[in-house]
Amino acid sequence: MSNLKFAETHNLVAFLEKPEESDGFEGIIDFLNASSIRYALTMNLTIYTSCIKQFWATAKEKTVNGEIQIQALVDRKKVIITETSVRRALQLKDAKGTECLPNATIFAELERIEYINLTQKLTFYKAFFSPQWKFLIHTMP
């Protein structure tokens, strides 16, 4: 069983606009605006810290009928979180996921984001990304 806990950095909202101060980040902003996780990044819900702390203080990981769940108590009410409920709440439209992209697609997208030293190998180095893409790579889970 996993050790589940509250983290102060959760529940932060991204602002995916292009102000003048975002020079060099336009490509990343376009990428995130077009991605299936846009809603999840930008939805600004009111979430009370007391509820979050109650949730993580009581959270337990369980497997029910082959599905992993996080079960917790918030204001004495049982809360159950599953992958399906998260996908529904965040409006993720890739329920089947992506197992593999064709190499041509991978290389076309790397070229589009101006990856330096592009070869036909499927080994990529953070050093060959622009500073803006390095930042995104470093901050995304």
Image (spheres, helix red, strand yellow):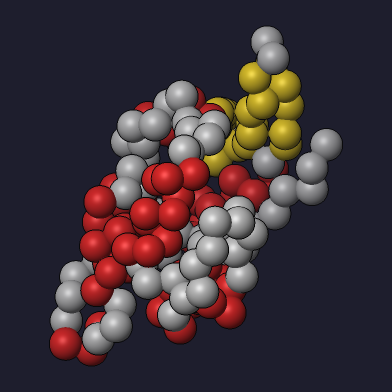
* Left or right of 20, for residue 53: right
The answer to whether residue 88 shows anywhere in this view is: yes
Task: Indicate the quadrant where residue 108 lies.
Answer: bottom left
* Left or right of 94, for residue 19: left
Give how far across and how far down residue 138 sits, in percent.
Answer: 56, 71
At x 61%, y 70%, the residue is 125
The answer to whether residue 53 shows anywhere in this view is: no
At x 51%, y 74%, the residue is 117
Give how far across and how far down residue 43 sits, in percent.
Answer: 29, 53
Give how far across and how far down residue 57 sits, in percent.
Answer: 69, 50
- Toward the viewer: 51 or 111? 111
Up/down of 23 relative to 78, above or below:
below
At x 24%, y 62%, the residue is 30
Q: Quadrant of the C terminus?
A: bottom right
Task: Indicate the quadrant where residue 73 lies.
Answer: top right
Task: Indicate the quadrant where residue 110 lies.
Answer: bottom left
Point out the residue furthest to the front here.
120
Up/down of 139 relative to 131, above or below:
above
Give how far across and how far down residue 9 sits, in percent.
Answer: 54, 67
Count every numbered label the image shows and give the total.
0
Point out the residue furthest to the top here.
65
